[in-house]
Image (tube, rainbow, N blue to C red):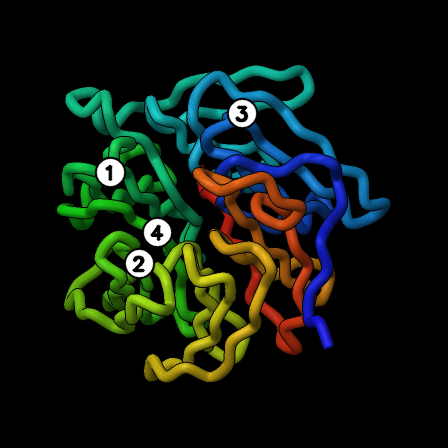
Amino acid sequence: MAHWRTIDRGIRDRLGEGALWSARDNAVYWVDILAPALNRLSLAGGAIERWDMPEPLGWVVQNRNGELIGGFQSGFALISLDPFAVRPIADPEPHLPGNRMNDGKADRHGAIWCGTMDMAERDACGSLYRLAPDGGWRVMDSGYLVPNGPAFSPCGRWLYHSDTARRTIYRFELTETDISNKQPFILFAEEEGYPDGMTTDGEGYLWVAHWDGGRISRFSPEGRLDRAIALPARRVTSICFAGEALDRMFVTSAATDLPPSIHDGALFEVEAGVSGIPTGTYGG
């Protein structure tokens, strides 16, 4: 019995990523990094809207006023959808024009954690950043090839973040403003693909998308595999819990460098059997 369904919208993302649940809009947002575009699925009626973006867009986060903050190749920017406008906030890497932002989320304290990467995926010049509610940003970790995640434990003690190219998920101790004690937490075997986007559920388990692995997996707070759900897309990229009870799971995928398919690059709804934690919002 299938535990998933494809959201039929007639469009396949080149690189779907950054799934985000918005309780305010009763909608799921996600990006197509390489199109580049921003998508929105209304849970009220199932309508899907898509906005073309001026440059690669790795993630979006809502602030407490409902506005969208986006992580572009050129840095942080405020996105208005009606009327459409993109207003730059800051570029943390003007010295690395070949880098772009790849994945990001807001924590319970109103800060955004996000990673940057070399678009050519050659140099380990990516970093993990924290954008504070006051607009200040700083490098929290560096040396990444392809940063992904991040995810936060419901207790607030742990930050999970991966270097996809190294098949490694790291766990950091997390405080309101800092991280420490970086440790390899989960290592993927070659046959499992690569760890991509992540989220946590209300029981403290970590859900991970498998790029080149065709599945999502649930890991215990101790890092043990709890279960896996196979999907018909080879390159699964990000996960979010959505809906009023946070019991609906949506999963993005990519069609990058793959032959045409009805599943690669699709958005899926998955029966997870558990509920998630509230989406963090940016405090700025």
Which sits earlier in the primary sequence, circle 2 or circle 3? 3
- Distance from label 1 to label 2 (Cα)? 18 Å
At horizontal 58% and vertical 31% (from top left) the residue drawn is 38
Question: Residue 125 occupies which quadrant of the picture?
Answer: top left
Q: Position of residue 132 (x, y in %)?
A: 33, 41
Query: Which amino acid does the dot numbered 4 rest on?
Result: Asn
Q: Is residue 198 left or right of residue 62?
A: left
At horizontal 66% and vertical 29% (from top left) the residue drawn is 50
Q: Is residue 122 left or right of residue 247?
A: left
Q: Quadrant of the N terminus?
A: bottom right
Q: Which label sits on residue 148? A: 4
Q: Quadrant of the C terminus?
A: top left
Query: Which amino acid does the dot numbered 1 rest on?
Result: Glu
Which sits earlier in the primary sequence, circle 1 or circle 4? 1
Q: Which label sits on residue 121? A: 1
Q: Position of residue 278 (x, y in %)?
A: 57, 61
Query: Which amino acid does the dot numbered 3 rest on?
Result: Ile
Query: Which amino acid does the dot numbered 2 rest on?
Result: His
Q: Which label sits on residue 103? A: none
